Amino acid sequence: METSKGTILISAGGTGGHLFPAEALAHELKARGWSVPLATDERATRYADRFPEDRLHVIQSATVSGKNPVTVVRALWSLFKGMRQSSALLNVLKPKAVVGFGGYPTVPPLWSAAGAFPTVIHEQNAVMGRANKMLARRMTAIAGGFLKAEGALADRIVETGNPVRPAVIAASQAPYFAPDRTGPLRFVVFGGSQGARFFSDAVPDAIAQLPDDLRGRIEITQQARPEDEERVRARYAELGVTADVSPFFSDLPARVAAAHLVMSRSGASTVSEIAAIGRPAILVPYPYALDHDQAANAAALEAAGGALVRREQDLDAAKVSGLLVELLADPDRLSAMAEAARRAGKPEATALLADLVEAIASGRTAAEFKAG
């Protein structure tokens, strides 16, 4: 049954980085009285139970990349079929607005909707992804996680921040307490499925090189891939270090909130969550990230004073150990970084993005929304 306000169609690529902020917006809009079906590709069916309603529409799409003409033609044909599916879906749903969160599965619905319906794309990263670049000039508004309102599309860009999970918003309420001179030093390390191997290799050896007084106080939470988990745990046990090592922590936001220092990759969601919670961080961008978006995200938090950024190729165990000594021995600096991160964070991003979407759905422009 459609709710009283009508329908806002959400579209997102089939990865968690695209779907999680889409899920956050969907819950907010649902709470405001909107119907919020999801259009995506087949990969996203594993996330369907997280959306606030069960209307998931699978749309054909493909990634347009490479130089093989046969591959390119096949991808374009899939996108064309996806656009026909999208046009039919739009005619049935008649949404008040269509919102995209990046990834090629958003291209058919958003391209088909442009001009006929109000449209919004949300870009999580400081560098616009390829699918969003294809769509940007046709959109009514562009919401930015780290994207700045500059360039030819500045009048359409609204800096909303990235929607974060309710658990992150809850964790953001916890104040930061810098470590004292004798108590525990809580250090949280996580890197995601593609990025955790470097941390599994470098961090235990870095801990081994710490001065005895620091090593004896450190308490570690570390994400490690399943194939690395046992050797990382064994290494910490050998060092006599208190460590909780796992491929996944369901309570990671709470662990970050309890940390004195964080070390992580710098995907858009990761940086947004660290900033929203307000914790000092060492960010090591994943060096093979498409369009170097992780480096740009990390640079944004470093510029705000909330993080130190180091390239993976410039780090080894000795340098990581030196960074830990430098930061953990300076509580005032950690406190200043935590406060700077918190100022840069936007735990209200979900509500602000929902405000923008409702404004666009009502016929206002991005410029009118920014003007109040």
Image (spheres, rainbow, N blue to C red):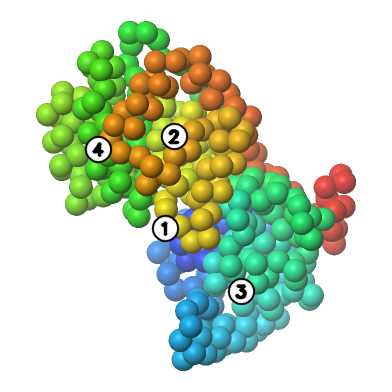
Q: How many marks?
A: 4
Q: Earlier in the sequence, mark 1 or mark 3?
A: 3
Please tell me whether mark 2 sits on a helix, a strand or a loop.
Answer: strand
Depth check: give the residue in front, 274 or 26.
274
Q: Position of residue 359 (x, y in %)?
A: 80, 54
Q: Residue placed at 18% from the left, 36% from the top?
A: 233
Disc 3 target residue: 107
Disc 4 target residue: 245
Between marks 2 and 4, how big is the CA–CA gap? 19 Å
Between marks 2 and 1, how big is the CA–CA gap? 18 Å
Please tell me whether mark 1 sits on a helix, a strand or a loop.
Answer: loop
Q: Earlier in the sequence, mark 2 or mark 1?
A: 2
Question: Crowdedness of circle 2 by 10 Å Cα count: few (<14), some, many (20+)?
Answer: many
Disc 1 target residue: 288
Q: Are marks 2 and 1 in contact (CB under 8 Å)?
A: no
Disc 2 target residue: 282
Between marks 1 and 4, how big is the CA–CA gap? 25 Å
Q: Residue placed at 45% from the left, 47% from the top?
A: 285
Q: Earlier in the sequence, mark 3 or mark 2?
A: 3
Q: From this viewpoint, is residue 147 visible?
A: yes
Please tell me whether mark 3 sits on a helix, a strand or a loop.
Answer: helix
Amino acid residing under circle 4: Val
| Quarter of the image where the N terminus is located | bottom right
Judged left or right of residue 178, residue 125 is: right
Image: 16 above or below 67 = above
Quarter-of-image position of residue 94? bottom right
Depth check: give the residue in front, 18 or 310.
310
